[in-house]
Amino acid sequence: MIYIHIPISWDNPEMDRLDLFCSTLKTLQIKNKKVFIHCAKNYRVSIFMYHYKKNILKDKSAKLILPKGFKPNKTWRKIIHQDIYKKTNKLNLEWVYNSDDINWNELSNLYKIAPLGDKKPNDLNTVFTNSIFKCFVYLDEVLIGVGRALADGFDCSYICDVAIHPDYQSKGIGKAIVNELIKLSQGHNKIILYSNPGKEQFYSKLGFDTMNTAMAIFKNKEQALEYKLTRKVQYK
């Protein structure tokens, strides 16, 4: 048995360590070697193996399963979601995954100009604070994209409130946010959202299927009907 040691920092993993891990593993597999991988803390090998399967082997079924309680810091998130960072790096975007320092007035204005309605700052504070997953995307310290997922940690994750600044729409940022929220929601039995009329094909390309019997009670039922989010059921 050949022992190969690849030291990796707990809190500040370097990208060259990831590259070395992937190249070593690929070389061993080409040679049809049986490989055993050990890590004192499972999250490092879990993240590296996820990257290897998804980005090196191009395995679309690759899933990231992290030890319970582990919350990736910014450096680990860049490795986990490397494909997202590469796609949006041309704009030098900054991704933020908590709402600790969010300017709620700025967020409220983003929804107005998107345009996705008048969402009050205090209401946004409430809904984002109560959502397990959220993504805020900045360019030169200006908020240009956002999305959240209201999730229970096991059964259901509901993706909603995705909005992009009008100057940066049609650049793949909205798609990147939805994909990011899907990844963060992995492990739930179902991930759901409701699409604006005409956007069904966009979401179907991201893996969503149309539900046959989904129903909802909207606070403003007339508005939901007007926006074609719902339709009246005709009973026989």
Image (cartoon, rainbow, N blue to C red):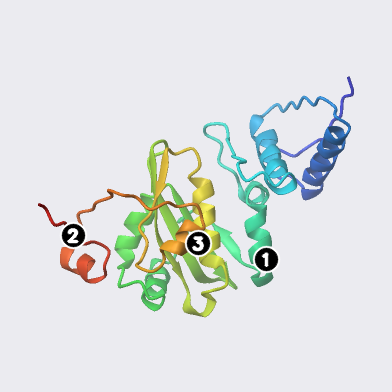
Give the side of residue 21 with respect to residue 96, left or right: right
Going 68% across and 61% down the picture, which residue do you hit? 86
Q: Residue 14, how many percent across, how many down?
A: 77, 47
Q: Is residue 186 above or below residue 116?
A: above
Q: Residues within 10 Å of mark 3 (few under 14, many from 20)?
A: many
Disc 3 residue type (three-letter): Phe
Q: Residue 15, how many percent across, how many down?
A: 77, 49
Residue that numbered label 3 is attached to: 136
Kindly state the secondary structure of the residue where label 2 is placed: loop
Kindly state the secondary structure of the residue where label 3 is placed: strand
| Quarter of the view holding residue 140 | bottom right
Instruction: Tell whether label 3 touches label 2 (CB within 8 Å).
Output: no
Give the side of residue 156 with respect to residue 87, left or right: left
Disc 2 residue type (three-letter): Lys
Residue 219, label in figure: 2
**Cα gap from disc 1 to disc 3, whole angstroms:** 15 Å
Q: Residues within 10 Å of mark 1 (few under 14, many from 20)?
A: few
Q: Is residue 150 above or below residue 226?
A: above
Disc 1 residue type (three-letter): Asn
For the N terminus, the quadrant is top right
**Cα gap from disc 2 to disc 3, whole angstroms:** 27 Å
Give the side of residue 130 with respect to residue 187, left or right: left
Residue 89, label in figure: 1
Kindly state the secondary structure of the residue where label 1 is placed: helix
